[in-house]
Structure formats: structure tokens, C-alpha cells
């Protein structure tokens, strides 16, 4: 390919030029080799892996190369991907790296094919890339599919379907999405709404929040032949696309890449008569939702390999629906998932073969100042007597033993665990970080009966003789009854056989007793009977919590003989309380 033809080709595909409206920075020289051109970068979600096209090769034309970061601003020398590259058969620029860095999706007319250009998928296994596979129908059609983009949860693939395509060109394209049915099957593609498919639309790129889509369009009102636009999905409806004026030029603008943090955009620009890869800061108003990139490893305590067994899932706590699911790969116990802001997630690692415990944690992203990366590595216990599995995601209403609806996800996980490990008997154990007791009730305290006092007053003592000091009446073993409300009642005079009575201002024993909190029982003919319950107040609801969860599991089908409930109060070896809860529960394996 002569140099003039090469420059014409690059001018057709160029994303941004020196006229870009945001400051830009070239990537280092081992990426942008002098006197050669390097175009169409695609980065993983963490921004640490990248594929791109370059004509710095041993053959004519462009080929795809792979590299990874070795420092904040440094990259490993790029290497070609022999198992993927077929320059004469692949649609140039169509390569896209998945957010977890484990897959490359691209368009090619290699065999076996369904149509002219099909979507192909290659998986990274260790340091190598697998032989690309054609997902077949209905994702691919007898026509032309290209420029695919895999969603961060791996459930959807966005792409263009064109009337005609060749190695460098495409015409009359529209955007589609297909959803994953199984590991190898995809659903019938659906066209995106007319407001998106308004003209010639190409190169869809779904962002890490799984709700923002950047694509190129030839619609009226742009700066050049193709401009970049952005749309967001709100309540499952795509918003009106907006022009990315901060990056668009009077040339063809396509093929951008935005890592999960959402504040940087990678693109192609000109430098000394060649094309180089640049990056720039995205203005705040054009950024997708903030995202937590959650990474980590899953290990088994006994040293066995959890790969190909453990499923990592994130549930939306508000809706109870699965947000994302991923499975550990063979010989790789690491995982990566992306969680956008706006809700709380129940994230778990769950073995499919039994014999090991599980892990679950609540991650609250309702308020998220910035996108960030976080590690959550998990070690799962081997199931044997004495092993405990923390239940971090079981939650109760404040100051009560009533389960919150948020706990339904965790309860189903416990039931799944019991099914995977049949016939084991477990104890539902509940703890609190510290027990408080008080004589005064409050929201955080539960009343507890500590004693009941009964007293009987002879009926004839209700009439007090005249020589008794009426201002004070004392019961045996009780405090003096004082400050009672004065009552006027009849007193029979001592030694007076007459029927005459006089009125004496004094305190009724009955009323004085009731003023001290006593309650009357139905008495005999000879006695007035009263009782008083003495309380103390405490915050130990652990027994009630354990029993509530046990009863819920029984209600949902777990055999009662396999469950025991016990509240341990603050008798714990390790404090697992958190800022939002001062209690926690565990499953203790008792045996078969």
C-alpha cells in the first residue's frame, strides 16, 4: 500500500484532528512509533489494557496489537495478536476490547461465515487469545454486521448492520442490540429507536454504566461527515442524542474509547503528518454515570481451585433483580464487575458444586462522589463441623427482629446453599457488638420482665381507725406510700358502737397502691389483691433475630430438623458489626 493511499484511508477514518476543542495528550513513543500511524484505540474498563491498529508491522497495511500499562503513563511494547489478525479479511477499526479485558469482538468476512461481514469473538486465556468464534444466527445475518461493542455485564452486544461493507467502507448502516441467551447463543437483534437510527449510524460504544451509548452519525447538524453523539437510557427509554461538540471536528469522527472511570476519552489525532493515539479529559456534562469497578479473587480455604465453579453475582437490592453475573474462568480465580451509581447492590460469590461456603456483601452506591476501583477478594470455607459463614446481607428493621425486604436475596442464597449441601445441620447464630441495660426505655432497648410482686390488703384495713396516722400508709417490704392524691373517705370510729361516721381527710390505701403502679386483680371477699411487674430494658434481640430467620427458612421449605436458632448476645470472638448495624448473623455448620 503506497503512502498516498494510506493517508487517504486514514483521513476517511480519522476521529479527531488538531482542531479538537479539548486539550489532548499523546500516548508515549513506544505506542506512537515515529513516522508510522496508530489508530482506533480500545481500552479495558480499568484503562490498563489496550488494543489498537498500527501500520508499524512486518507487512503492508494495518494490524491489531495488544499492550498493557506498566506505570501511570507507561505501556508495555505492543505485540501483534496472530490468532486474530487477518488484515485482508477484517473490517478495519472494528476491533473492540471488552470492559473486563477478556474478550475482543470484531467484524470479519473470514470463514465459516453467515453473511458478508460477521461478528466474531476471541477470548483471552492466560496471555494468549483464542481462535475467534462466529456466534452464528440470529446475531449474524446474511447481510453485514460490524463495529460491535460488548456491554460491561456481558449480557448485550451493540453493533451496526449495513447495506454494504468492505475492508474500509460501510454504507447505510443502522444500530442494533442483541442480548445473550446462553454462553454461545444470542437473541434476535433489535434496532435501536428511530431517534438514534435517524441517518447513517456507525460504531456504537456502550459505556461502563451500561446506560450511556456513544455512536457516530451522518445526520444533519454535525461538523463533519460523521460526528460523535451520546444518548442515555432512562427508565428503559433512550434520550435524544446530543452532539459531542467538545471532540467533534470537520472530519469523520469515530472509534472512541472511554474507560470505566468516565473522565478520559482516547481517540486518534494527527501528529507530524501521521496519526497518533491521544487522550483528553471529558467535560463533566458529557460524562456517563459514575461507576464502581469491583475486582478481586475468589479462593477456597482448602487450597482447591474455585475456577469453573464459582458464580459472581450482583443484585439490585431495591428491585431484587440480578444486575450482573459472571463466572470464574478455568485456571483464573479473578473477576471484574462494574456497578453504576444510584442504588445498593448485594454482591456474592456462590459455588455451584457445593462442599464450600459462600460470601455476600452489601455495596451501597446511592451516593457516589467519583468513579473508583475497589478490591473485594473472598475466601470460601470448606464445609465441615465448626465452620461459620457470615451473613452480612441479612438485615432487620431498626430496633426490632423483623427482617427487612433487602434480606430476601440473602435468604434465597442460604436456601441454595442448603440444597447444594443436603442433609447438613446448621445453627443460625446471632450476635450484637455490645449489650446495654437500663431502667429507662428507649427506641434501641427492649423491655424484659425481671420480677412480679403480689400484695394483698385485707378488706377491713381499707377502713382506717381514727388513731392511725393517715398521712402515711406503709406496706410490708415496700416503700412508703407518700405523695398520693388525698381522698375523702368514711372512717369508723374506734370503740363507738353507734352507726355514726365522720369524714376524715386522708389517703386511700387502694389509691396509694395504684399510684405506685400496681394493678388490681379480682380479689376474694376478705382481700384486695394487687400485682406489680418490674422491668429492665436491654438491646439484646439476638435470640429473636435467630429465630426469625430460622422460621423464615422453614416457611420457605428448609426442613426444621436441619435448623437450630441461638442468640449469643455479645459473646463473640470477632466483632463483625458495621456502621449501619450493630448486629450480625452466621451459619454454623453442626454436621450431618
Image: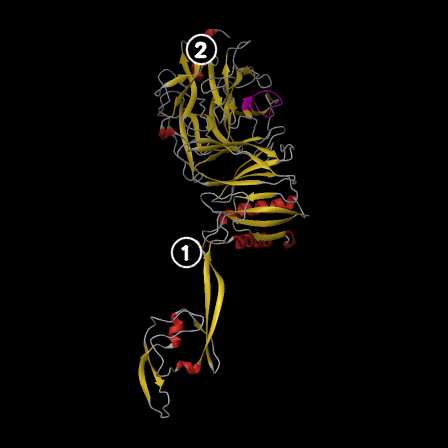
Q: In what element is the residue under mark 1?
A: loop
Residue nearest the viewer, comparing 81 with 576: 576
Tag of residue 7: 2
Tag of residue 442: 1
Residue 4 seen by the camera: yes
Q: In what element is the residue under mark 2?
A: helix
Tag of residue 310: none
Q: What is the span of residues highlighted in magenta in the rendered image?
A: 105-118
Q: In which quarter of the image is residue 502?
A: bottom left
User: Please, which residue is most extreme toward the bottom here?
Assistant: 498
Tell me residue 447's x, y (percent): 46, 59
Residue nearest the viewer, comparing 564 with 314: 564
Report whether 46 appears left or right of 282.
Answer: right
For the point 56% across and 26% down, which residue is it?
102
Tell me: residue 277, above or below residue 156: above
Q: Quadrant of residue 112?
A: top right
Report whether 124 appears left or right of 453.
Answer: right
Mark 2 / mark 1, whichever is N-terminal: 2
Tell me residue 200's x, y (percent): 44, 25
Tell me: residue 195, above or below residue 450: above
Amino acid at each position: 500500500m503506497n503512502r498516498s493511499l494510506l493517508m487517504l484511508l486514514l483521513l476517511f477514518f480519522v476521529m479527531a484532528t488538531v482542531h479538537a476543542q479539548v486539550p489532548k495528550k499523546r500516548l508515549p513513543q513506544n505506542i506512537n512509533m515515529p513516522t508510522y500511524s496508530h489508530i482506533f484505540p480500545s481500552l479495558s474498563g480499568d484503562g490498563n489494557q489496550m488494543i489498537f491498529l498500527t501500520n508499524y508491522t512486518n507487512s503492508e497495511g494495518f494490524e491489531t496489537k495488544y499492550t498493557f500499562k506498566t506505570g501511570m503513563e507507561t505501556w508495555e511494547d505492543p505485540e501483534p495478536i496472530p490468532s486474530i489478525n487477518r488484515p485482508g479479511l477484517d473490517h478495519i477499526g472494528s476491533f473492540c476490547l471488552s470492559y473486563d479485558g477478556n474478550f475482543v469482538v470484531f467484524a470479519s468476512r473470514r470463514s465459516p461465515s453467515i453473511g458478508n461481514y460477521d461478528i466474531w469473538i476471541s477470548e483471552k486465556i492466560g496471555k494468549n487469545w483464542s481462535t475467534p468464534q462466529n456466534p452464528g444466527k440470529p446475531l449474524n445475518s446474511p447481510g453485514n454486521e460490524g463495529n460491535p461493542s460488548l456491554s460491561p455485564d456481558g449480557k448485550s452486544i451493540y453493533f451496526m448492520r449495513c447495506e454494504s461493507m468492505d475492508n474500509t467502507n460501510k454504507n447505510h448502516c443502522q444500530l442494533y442490540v442483541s442480548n445473550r441467551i446462553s454462553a454461545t447463543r444470542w437473541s434476535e437483534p433489535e434496532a435501536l429507536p428511530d431517534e438514534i437510527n435517524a441517518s447513517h449510524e456507525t460504531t456504537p460504544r456502550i459505556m461502563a454504566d451500561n446506560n450511556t451509548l456513544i455512536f457516530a452519525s451522518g445526520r444533519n447538524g454535525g461538523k463533519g461527515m460523521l460526528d460523535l453523539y451520546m444518548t442515555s437510557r432512562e427508565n428503559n427509554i433512550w434520550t435524544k442524542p446530543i452532539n459531542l461538540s467538545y471532540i467533534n471536528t470537520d472530519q469523520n469522527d469515530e472509534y472512541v474509547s472511554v474507560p470505566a472511570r468516565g473522565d478520559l476519552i482516547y481517540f486518534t489525532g494527527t501528529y507530524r503528518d501521521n496519526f497518533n493515539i491521544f487522550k483528553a479529559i471529558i467535560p463533566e456534562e458529557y460524562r456517563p454515570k459514575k461507576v464502581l469497578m469491583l475486582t478481586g479473587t475468589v479462593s477456597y480455604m482448602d487450597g482447591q481451585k474455585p475456577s469453573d465453579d464459582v458464580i459472581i453475582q450482583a443484585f439490585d437490592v431495591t428491585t431484587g433483580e440480578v444486575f450482573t453475573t459472571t463466572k470464574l474462568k478455568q485456571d483464573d480465580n479473578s473477576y471484574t464487575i462494574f456497578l453504576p451509581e444510584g442504588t445498593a447492590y448485594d454482591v456474592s460469590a456462590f459455588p455451584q458444586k457445593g462442599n464450600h461456603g459462600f460470601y455476600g456483601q452489601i455495596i451501597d452506591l446511592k451516593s457516589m462522589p467519583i468513579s473508583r476501583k475497589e478490591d473485594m477478594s473472598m475466601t470460601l470455607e470448606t464445609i465441615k463441623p465448626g465452620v461459620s459463614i457470615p451473613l452480612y446481607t441479612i438485615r432487620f428493621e431498626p430496633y426490632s427482629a423483623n427482617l427487612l425486604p433487602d434480606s430476601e436475596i440473602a435468604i434465597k442464597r442460604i436456601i441454595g446453599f442448603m440444597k447444594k449441601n443436603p442433609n447438613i445441620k446448621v445453627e443460625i447464630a446471632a450476635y450484637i457488638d455490645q449489650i446495654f441495660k437500663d431502667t429507662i426505655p428507649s427506641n434501641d432497648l427492649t423491655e424484659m420482665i425481671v420480677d412480679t410482686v403480689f400484695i394483698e390488703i385485707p378488706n377491713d384495713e381499707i377502713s382506717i381507725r381514727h388513731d392511725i396516722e393517715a398521712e402515711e400508709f406503709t406496706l410490708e417490704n415496700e416503700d412508703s406510700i407518700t405523695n398520693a392524691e388525698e381522698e375523702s373517705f368514711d372512717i369508723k370510729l374506734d370503740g363507738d358502737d353507734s352507726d355514726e361516721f365522720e369524714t376524715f381527710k386522708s389517703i386511700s390505701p387502694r389509691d396509694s397502691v395504684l399510684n405506685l403502679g400496681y394493678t388490681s386483680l379480682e380479689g376474694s371477699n376478705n382481700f384486695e389483691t394487687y400485682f406489680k411487674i418490674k422491668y429492665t430494658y436491654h438491646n439484646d434481640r439476638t435470640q429473636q433475630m435467630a429465630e426469625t430467620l430460622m422460621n423464615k427458612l422453614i416457611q420457605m421449605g428448609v426442613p426444621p430438623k436441619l435448623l437450630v436458632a441461638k442468640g449469643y448476645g455479645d459473646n463473640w470472638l470477632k466483632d463483625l458489626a458495621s456502621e449501619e448495624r450493630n448486629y450480625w448473623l452466621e451459619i454454623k455448620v453442626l454436621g450431618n
